[in-house]
Image (cartoon, grey):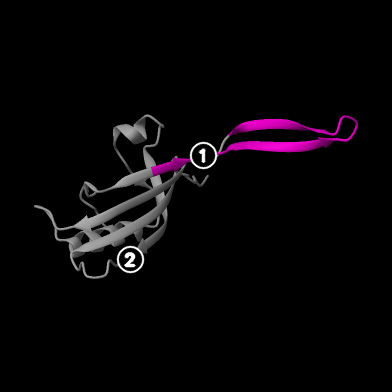
Amino acid sequence: MKRYDDLWLPATTMLDFSRAKNVIKTNNNKKKKKVKEVFGFDDWQIRIRMLCIDDNKYKAREYADILQDWFEIAGGINVFGSILSKKEIYNIVIEDFDVRTVSGSPNVIPIEMSAVSNIPAELFISEK
């Protein structure tokens, strides 16, 4: 168990969101059309893109190292922000982490992460 301090993402961070509906399609041979059954929504898919650059709190490399530590969390991460709360996203799981380089710019580290929205649940087993 490790405790993580709150982290504000770099000011250069951009979030992209996508979400699908859970739809089952069944062929209707008589009318050559499909019957669609909608069973709600899938999780939000979130692409997080940022440039880690030196600022008044961290150096670019420190940002990259901290973000990699967050990626290595084996579980959900509580998140806050108006763009997230409007979509009712309060917890995410980071699924993918990609660090790149910019030629000739040692203090600029592009990072892209893929995440999904998450609703944490705890399971308690009682012995009787």
**Which segment is the magenta one?**
16-40
- At which x and y percent is residue 67? 28, 58
Residue 1 appears in the figure = no
Quarter-of-image position of residue 103 = bottom left
Q: Is residue 56 left or right of residue 101?
A: left
Dot 2 corresponds to which residue? Answer: 100
**Distance between the Cα atoms at labels 2 and 1?**
26 Å
Which label sits in the foreground, 2 or 1? 2
Q: Is residue 33 left or right of residue 22?
A: right
Quarter-of-image position of residue 90 = top left
**What is the three-letter code of the residue carrying label 2?**
Arg
Question: Which of the two labelled residues, at mark 2 and mark 1, occupies the earlier sequence position?
Answer: 1
In the picture as drawn, the residue positioned furthest to the right comes out as 30
Q: Secondary structure at mark 1?
A: loop
Residue drawn 78% across the image and 37% down it: 26
Rendered image: mark on residue 19:
1
Q: Secondary structure at mark 2?
A: loop
- At which x and y percent is residue 87? 41, 32
